[in-house]
Image (spheres, rainbow, N blue to C red):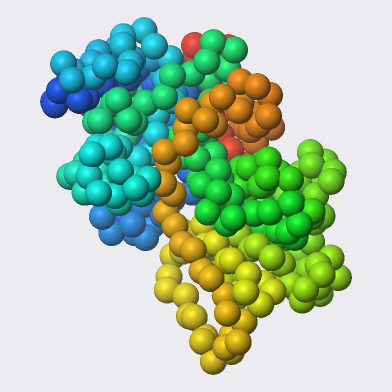
Amino acid sequence: MLALTYIEHGKFGLTEKPVPEIIAPGDAIVRVTLGSICTSDLHIKHGSVPRAVPGITVGHEMVGVVEKTGSAVHNVKPGDRVAVNVETFCGECFFCKHGYVNNCTDPDGGWALGCRIDGGQAEYVRVPHADTGLSLIPDNVSDEQALFVGDILATGYWAAKISEISPEDTVLIIGAGPTGICTLLCTMLKKPAKIIVCEQDAARRRFVEEHYPDVLVTSPEGCKEFVLAHSLHGGADRVMEVAGGTDTFRLAWECARPNAIVTVVALYDRPQVLPLPDMYGKNLTFKTGGVDGCDCDEILRLISEGKIDTTPLITHRFPLDRIMDAYEIFENRLDGVIKISVLPTAAGDLK
């Protein structure tokens, strides 16, 4: 089968690999019907994820059809349409039982797919702990509607949940990339008094304005003043930092009111400074990633009921044998790209 492989630091390549087989009783083999490219894949390419293993198939955003299951798998069966969770988790360790599945202590626990074990930018993928890592897709939900459930939409849902948003709050979301938009969608479910999105890129600001007209939009240059003008207590009640840029960490805590919650969702390329003398007296609570992706069934229910729709994020579609072209567009933010769907078929077969 075709598989996009992490060759070495700075290099991915499309290679031929054997179709995966069942290794453990909890495994499932999933035929990928649709995949996507995530910014975290770029972090692997450029060496920002030290635990990533050269030679692995990358990719952790995918949906598909179950082909085979191990003897210990009971929640899914061959023929089921499923969303694949970015995290594989045992469900039995201390962290899993407390909902902290990102920190699952199993050797294949946490973010393993497309990082430490072969992922889904391929025609087939082996999913360990299939009973917890696969979610059944409702019949009225398409592959494109379900594509982001296991990763960036789970991240947005988790970020909104741990931020403890109330109806009186002004919420600031820094970053309107794909994960930022998913965070916005899940924040909207909480119905806070105001939502402000801060984004550097003008095209992405326009995207938010066009698709979510009730959301306030600003740029980083005027963000602090904008937040002060649209909040009651000297800053945002809740801040979610989803950009991971050079100055966005500082911007996040500077825009927060005293005693606010600042949720750091972004994956940074380099260390950030927590200047405690400068923020002394603000009494901020910081919450940090990564995602505990254990709400995928609930997210799929919300999609099925029409309460979440991420399909506008898919701006480009490519077959698997042209995935290197897709990466060129995604990495360099060309042609107004937000998200790319990847169909595991040849270019000549793509309709």
Q: Judge left or right: residue 50 versus residue 321.
A: left
Against 46, is 17 above or below? above
| Quadrant (top left, top right, bottom left, bottom right) of the N terminus | top left
Quadrant of residue 233 within the rendered picture: bottom right
Residue 126 image position (x, y, % from top left): 26, 26
Quadrant of residue 340 within the rendered picture: top right
Q: Judge left or right: residue 30 versus residue 128.
A: right
| Viewer-closest of 109 and 47 | 109
What residue is shown at x 82% (from left), y 70% (from top)?
232
What residue is shown at x 59% (from left), y 55% (from top)?
164
Residue 4 image position (x, y, % from top left): 34, 35
Residue 281 in view here: yes
Against 139, is 110 above or below? below
Quadrant of residue 202 within the rendered picture: bottom right
Q: Of all residues shown, which one is farthest toward the top?
A: 79
| Viewer-closest of 134 and 175 | 134
Residue 177 image position (x, y, % from top left): 62, 49
| Quadrant (top left, top right, bottom left, bottom right) of the C terminus | top right
What residue is shown at x 32% (from left), y 18% (from top)?
75
| Viewer-closest of 118 and 149 | 149
Residue 106 image position (x, y, % from top left): 19, 44
Against 125, is 335 above or below? below
Give the number of marks: 0
What residue is shown at x 58% (from left), y 38% (from top)?
339
Q: Judge left or right: residue 39 versus residue 176.
A: left
Residue 221 in view here: no
